[in-house]
Amino acid sequence: MADPIPPARLFDLSGHVACVTGASSGLGQRAATVLAAAGARVVGVARREAALADWQDRTGQDAAYVVRDVSDRDGLARLAEDVSAPFGPPDILVHAAGINTREAADEVTPEGWDRTLALNLAAPFFLSQQLVPAMKAKGWGRIVTFASLQTTRAFPGGLAYGASKGGIGQLTRAMAEAWSRHGITANAIGPGFIRTELTAPVFDDPERAARNAAQTCIGRNGEPEDFDGPLLFLCSDASGYVTGQILMVDGGFSAK
């Protein structure tokens, strides 16, 4: 039996390059900031250049960004080249870009459906596919997708979003089966009701926010900092024997 690895080394990302989509705000930007703080050189990807530039200024010289819409499937090969340009090919890939149109089932449009599935489900796979060859060559990689409470349960007004997040559960398992033998783990992190731009409609309704808090085992809704440790675990050597899993960061919401 090997000696234990010092905890500081388990979570140290020095020498690694991370790509985080959806890095202009919310948990995407939080992820990019956490990975940089752990020693990774990080490339953030999003559509809003001003927000990305502000994040880069606050993060420092080990941060870069690429302005792109990751739902543009025809542009993903070029995107893979662009995110590899600042620091080399990423060996950590966090898919945080997402959308929730919040349309009732009778009101879902083909355009809303296609937009949701393209960004939430297709982009994580096809961008991963572009970046996996470099991870295989290194023999090490971490892919983290964003699951949701709606990966396993239905919420009102969430048909297209729920379909995309249900797909993320199976996509995570399938990517793990395909690539983990090459040293590449694929896992998903499932935020509960954490205070971000995406969940603003929930937190803007005090009664609804209180009901959600009561549904958790812990008794409160989440804050962005609750996300830091679980994400770092999935992106580091600490999770080397963990793959194909969904880690719910929801205060026990899904356990009740």
Image (spheres, rainbow, N blue to C red):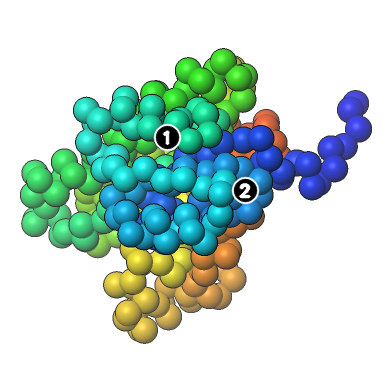
Label 2 vs 1, first from the N-terminus: 1
Residue indicated by mark 1: 83
- SS state under label 1: helix
Residue indicated by mark 2: 232
Mark 1: few, some, or many residues within 10 Å (few <14, many ≥20)? many
Q: Residue at x 37, y 50 (%)?
A: 22
x and y percentages locating residue 221 in the rendered image: 49, 72
Q: Residue at x 67, y 41 (%)?
A: 13
18 left or right, relative to 74? right
x and y percentages locating residue 120 in the rendered image: 31, 43
| 133 relative to 163, above or below | above
- Amino acid type at circle 2 is Leu
The tally of labels here is 2
168 left or right, relative to 8? left
In front here: 96 or 165? 96
In front here: 178 or 55? 55
| 78 relative to 162, above or below | above
| 233 relative to 143, above or below | below
Which circle, 2 or 1, is nearer the viewer? 1
- SS state under label 2: helix
In front here: 224 or 92? 92
48 left or right, relative to 229? left
Residue 241 shows up from this direction: yes
Separation of disc 2 and disc 1 at Cα? Answer: 20 Å
Q: Residue at x 36, y 60 (%)?
A: 51
Residue 146 shows up from this direction: no
Quarter of the image with the N terminus in it: top right
- Amino acid type at circle 1 is Val
x and y percentages locating residue 8 in the rendered image: 79, 47
Q: Residue at x 18, y 44 (%)?
A: 115
